[in-house]
Amino acid sequence: EEKTSSVGTAPSRPNIVILFADDLGYGDLGSYGHPYNSTPNLDALAREGQRWTDFYVAAPVCSPSRGALMTGQLPNRSGLYGRQLPVLHPNDSAGIPERELTMAEALKAQGYRTAIIGKWHLGDAPDTLPTRHGFDYWFGLPYSNDMDWVGHLTVDELLALAAQGKNEAVAQEIASRYPKYRDPKIEYWNVPLLRSRRSDDGYTDELVERPADQHTLTRRYTEEAERFIREAGDQPFLLYLPYTMPHTALFRSKEFVGRSLGGRYGDVIEEIDWSVGEIRRVLEQEGLHEQTLVFFSSDNGPWLAMQRDAGSAGLLSNGKGTTFEGGLRVPGIFWWPGTVKPSVVHDIGSTLDVFATALSLAGAPPVAGIDGMDLSATLKKGEPSPRDSIAYYRSGELQAFRKGLYKIRLVSEGAYGLPPKRTVHETPQLFHLGQDPGEKFDIAAEQPEVVSDLQAAVAAHQAGMDSREPIFDSRLKRLSAN
């Protein structure tokens, strides 16, 4: 029995389109200061809508960040994180727990059609697929495009070596993969492209191709999204389009090879921008643009270990995997012609807030006990953001906390073999992100009263955080049992 709702006419219940890039950095768009990447379509959305300068994700890596977007909950609260395994891997039994309400389920209950076109990365077992969590339709990859290595050790074999303390062998295996990123070929990764539908009769899941032809993924995602929009009819819809790119390995269609000054990475960014322009064009052709909120962001910062094949966090420090600004601060663009007035917002926002905001716009009652906040008054009326703080978690550990323009750092730690080495700060570091967005100048000694204030905020946050067991680590339990 489909739950429908007669909350109002379409304009009062907007369509929601979420365009979510993978590993795109804070500094990768022209509208966020990149000198070369040509991103005219995204820059137009930023100019005509709200461009947020202080927008964050809830985790600096893929799966926990996406889980937070879908549930509006910090990963520790939902359990969608790992202390030892930061993300989900192929052939995992774990996924979003049944107890968690997703954005797709909540909007479906309001009569929305729901589709995800792109990368899921919240489980690849049948009962963890997106169609089991509120989406009517899915076309895309179940996990990252560089998983399922061909001719290399599986993740379980790697974990077994690590468990035996064979760290040298693990390091050699990882090192042997890097040259393949530099000159990627489709046959290096046996990644499946799937299509799944939900109907009153149950679910149909089909394998479209394996390995996925990654050259054409961005184009095919765009075509699938356009088809979904054109079939909308009078029913409001949620379209979630998590691009596979620009996560390495980098692939683009032949029309984009050599288009940019930025090599393979720049080409990929320009193809994503082309895709965004196509989505906008179809919304306008169908007369839906004034009743559609389009949101663009990224799941975390740039994967700097990939060197020239990585993006840029601009003037922010470090990148993916870390709790420096470059790991969690991302572009945040909201476009809704006639409703969202053009402006630049310096308040704090988070991908956690998209769920609560979408529900509010759909006229649904708020969900209790989530971390996300409703940004609709900021979008519609330009009111201040209700959010004044950000908790920076990495693998379940709170490493930093921001309140207003001040950020306190409890732990410094690089990622993917890059500096800095892990340091637990006995005296927390303090940064003023207005004067020092690059986190270069520790002012804790100058402003001990601000440190005390933020320490109290950290204590209050931790007192309200009932951390669940890390779901992603269940794979290790299964391995040790075998």
Image (spheres, rainbow, N blue to C red):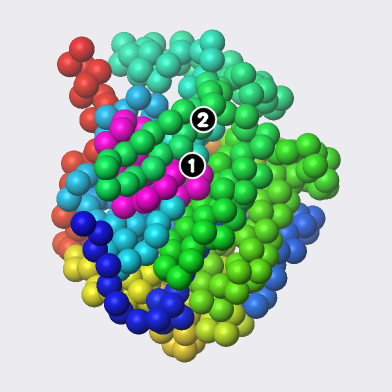
Q: Secondary structure at mark 1?
A: strand
Q: Position of residue 107 (x, y in %)?
A: 33, 64
Q: Residue at x 34, y 57 (%)?
A: 104
Q: Position of residue 350 (x, y in %)?
A: 42, 65
Callout 2 amino acid: Val
N-term mark: 1 or 2: 1
**Circle 2 residue:** 208
- Indicate whether residue 126 is drawn in magenta: yes
Number of dots carrying numbers: 2
Q: Position of residue 21 (x, y in %)?
A: 56, 51
Q: Secondary structure at mark 2?
A: strand
Can you say whether 257 is above or below 379 in the image? above
* Residue 369 in sight from this viewpoint: yes
Of the pair 24 and 144, the residue shown nearer to us: 144
**Circle 1 residue:** 139
Compared across the picture, whether 290 is left or right of 207 comes to right
Q: Where is the N terminus found, in terms of image quarters?
A: bottom left
Local packing at callout 2 (Cα closer than 10 Å; few below 14, some 14-19, many 20+) is some
Q: Are marks 1 and 2 in contact (CB under 8 Å)?
A: yes
Q: Position of residue 49 (x, y in %)?
A: 60, 77
Callout 1 amino acid: Phe
Give the magenta-colored segment's residue range: 116-138
Q: Residue at x 43, y 77 (%)?
A: 10
